[in-house]
Amino acid sequence: MTSLSGKSVLLVIGGGIAAYKCLELIRLLGKEGCKVVPLMTKAAEQFVTPLTVASLAGTKVYSDLFSLTDETEMGHIQLSRAADLVVVAPATADLMAKLAHGIANDLASTALLATDKSVLMAPAMNVRMWRHAATQRNLKTLIADGVLIVGPNDGDMACGEYGPGRLAEPDEIVAAIRASLATHPRVLAGKKVLITAGPTREPIDPVRYISNHSSGKQGYALAAAAVDLGAETMLVSGPVHLPLPPGAQVMPVESARDMLKVVEREVPCDIAIFTAAVADWRVESAANEKIKKSGKDAPTLILSENPDILKTIASLKSKRPKLVVGFAAETENVLEHAKAKLASKGCDLIVANDVSAKGDVFGSDQNAVHLVSANGVESWPRMSKAHVAEKLMAHFAKLIS
Ligand code: C5P
């Protein structure tokens, strides 16, 4: 894990109600020995006072582009370059728009344009502002320009609405800062990686469903590894109990058909990795009301086959991702089944693992995988899922380079 001790962060605080959370962020970073130089927009000063920020950071707050004292102490160009990383939290729609369009009309936007360091933005705004086509366009531009993004999260908003737009939690921002300062070469910068993860839930009625034991750990670890390598990372996730990987855009889904819809919307992309344990069958006609015990026979469920997401995407013509990777969880004859799957699904690579009791993979933090492709089989020793993910992403990056 990258240490933050001795590092320095220029923290640009935007003017939004979530600005109060930057106080906790400053505290957490300080606890890890990371120096925080705060830069506040005029609007941010309406939400938290510079005095509070300065007291927690233990250093002065910069806010004025034309301050003679600030410019003689530390010019705005130097301010933008002295830190190891520039963090914008909360990143308002306004700050995102300014950086996406190269506007520099106050100290914050000038520093963002003048810096030669990586910029990590933690957006926070009203859900409609976040979903607005202009903000989404700016987000795409920023990602393509190499700006790192953490959050926003889904949830209740201060304005009374619900949805994406909440500032990532301070500990998530710290994790994203750590990832941004890691010394991995950003070989996937400008590339889009799509990952499916977790189980799907197929409804029987509004309160019951069919699902499986997939923990989503390997898929989430791959998403974190893709973010570390600089990729625009889309994680289409079934219901799991895992912290969101900072920097990835997480799209929660329930059923296989929902998952397919979201995946189809997100292609084309450079790399698509299908780790999800998609339920093979769904109940043909799920009941609209809870099925009651009638006292007579138990109900009969008629199942129909779910779409094969991997196969559908691998057989696309113009929108096919450059690299399509499937996973094969097998309990016996792992390699034979994986080779057959490579052909039947039409993907470029199968990552196979043994999920029998002796394999001890489901829910575990460890995994032993075999890479099966047209070039043959490569078997890796047992290691942590995080390490498997790092090695796999580096391997996939090479394959598309
Ligand atoms: O056929 P099987 O489920 O063993 O194939 C496993 C691979 O296919 C995994 O990569 C899984 O994510 C993908 N898959 C899928 N859609 C399905 C079933 C499996 O994407 N309906």
Image (cartoon, grey):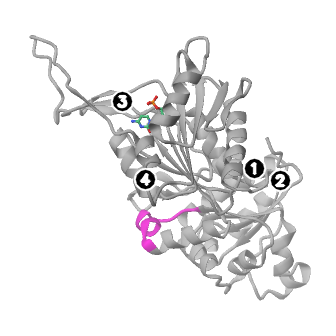
The answer to whether mark 3 and mark 4 are in CB contact below 8 A is no
| Residue indicated by mark 3 | 280
Which residue is more in the foreground, 22 or 396? 396
* Residue 56 visible in this rendered orientation of the protein: yes
Residue type at numbered disc 3: Asp
Tell me if 155 is positioned left or right of 182 in this view.
Answer: left
| Residue indicated by mark 2 | 34
Across and down, in percent, residue 161 comes to 38, 59
Q: Is residue 202 above or below residue 247?
A: above
Q: Please, what secondary structure does the residue beneath circle 1 have? A: helix
Q: Earlier in the sequence, mark 3 or mark 1?
A: 1
Residue type at numbered disc 2: Cys
Across and down, in percent, residue 149 comes to 62, 59
| Residue indicated by mark 1 | 178
Q: Is residue 241 above or below residue 12?
A: above
Tell me if 85 is positioned left or right of 267 in this view.
Answer: right
At 16% from the left edge and 33% from the top edge, which residue is drawn? 289
Which residue is more in the foreground, 3 or 139? 139
At 65% from the left edge and 28% from the top edge, which residue is drawn? 370
Q: Earlier in the sequence, mark 1 or mark 4?
A: 1
Q: Which mark is residue 316?
A: 4
Which residue is more in the foreground, 120 or 332? 332
